[in-house]
Image (spheres, grey):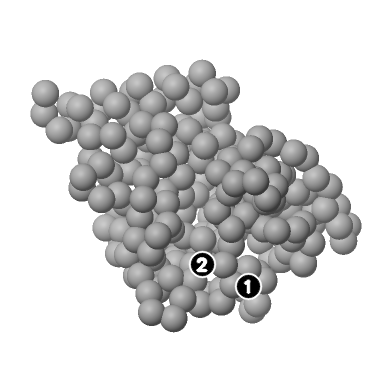
Amino acid sequence: MSNQALEREQLAAMLLRLRGLDVTGNALLTAIESIPRRIFLSPEFKNTVYSSQMFPIACGGFCESVDTLARLLQQLDVQSHHKILEVGCGSGYSGAVLSRLGEKVLTVDRYKNHVTLANEKYEQIGATNVIAKHADGLQGVEGEGTFDRIFVSASFKDMPRHFVEFLTSSGVMIAPLSLGNGTAKMVRLTKIGSRFEREDLFEVYDSPLLEGLAAAL
């Protein structure tokens, strides 16, 4: 079987698997299908990019499983007019999917290497409405206005109440909160007035957000 045929087969299997996980939004599934996941991962994983596993990336990070990402983005409920902030661009894959869903995406990362590689990939696939910036996203981003949606894949130790100021009214933030035992609880935070209304989702691997910019990478 050729590499292209294998990838098509794996993509079809993934889409069926996602529907089994109640990921049914046509816009989301179309967005995932439109982004070639393999270009965001190491060539050694080219035959398994659409599996349900996580993949290691540069700087000791990881690329979330496509299953988990799809479940989270369904909860994020991005609309075509939305401005989105992603904290932790990682491989750049999730930012690319978000670019197919919203109007504008800003993704930030403490590792310059992640930012450089992500922007190269965005140019490669012609995603002109997403940009990666080198920044410490733990405290949010100043000078960028407010966002309709905020997506964070690394965990906070406590409720990120300060992020409420970066959201528009009724804006939504998806983020994990550390449980302190190697796992974290994904939560959906909706801005109501000057506070968050919290909805607990499901548990994920705990990867804590790190403060500051990386010194070397």
Q: Looking at the image, which residue sits at the far front? A: 181
* Tag 1 residue: 141
Relative to the observer, which residue lies in front, 131 or 39? 39
Residue type highlighted by circle 2 = Val
Q: Is residue 36 left or right of residue 2?
A: right
* Tag 2 residue: 108
**Dot placed on the residue nearer the N-terminal end, 1 or 2:** 2
Q: Secondary structure at mark 1?
A: loop
Question: What's the residue at 63%, 38% (across, down)?
Answer: 203
Residue type highlighted by circle 1 = Val
Q: Is residue 16 left or right of residue 181?
A: left
Question: What's the residue at 31%, 58% (across, down)?
Answer: 121
Q: Quadrant of the C terminus?
A: bottom left
Question: What's the residue at 23%, 40% (across, down)?
Answer: 46
Q: Does residue 217 lie above or below 164 as drawn?
A: below
Q: Pointer 1 and pointer 2: residues touching (CB < 8 Å)?
A: yes
Q: Does residue 178 lie above or below 87 as drawn?
A: above
Q: Using the rendered image of the protein, determine whether residue 190 is visible from the camera's viewpoint.
A: yes
Mark 2: give few (<14), some (14-19) or many (20+) Cα within 10 Å.
Answer: many
Residue 120 percent coordinates (x, y): 30, 64
Q: Quadrant of the N terminus?
A: top left
Q: Does residue 17 lie above or below 206 as drawn?
A: above
Residue 216 percent coordinates (x, y): 38, 79
Q: Does residue 109 lie above or below 25 as drawn?
A: below
Q: Quadrant of residue 186?
A: top right
Residue 85 percent coordinates (x, y): 58, 60
Q: Is residue 27 left or right of residue 50?
A: right
Q: Quadrant of residue 195?
A: bottom right
Q: Secondary structure at mark 2?
A: strand
Disc 1 to disc 2, how far (Cα)? 9 Å
Question: What's the residue at 37%, 45% (across, down)?
Answer: 55
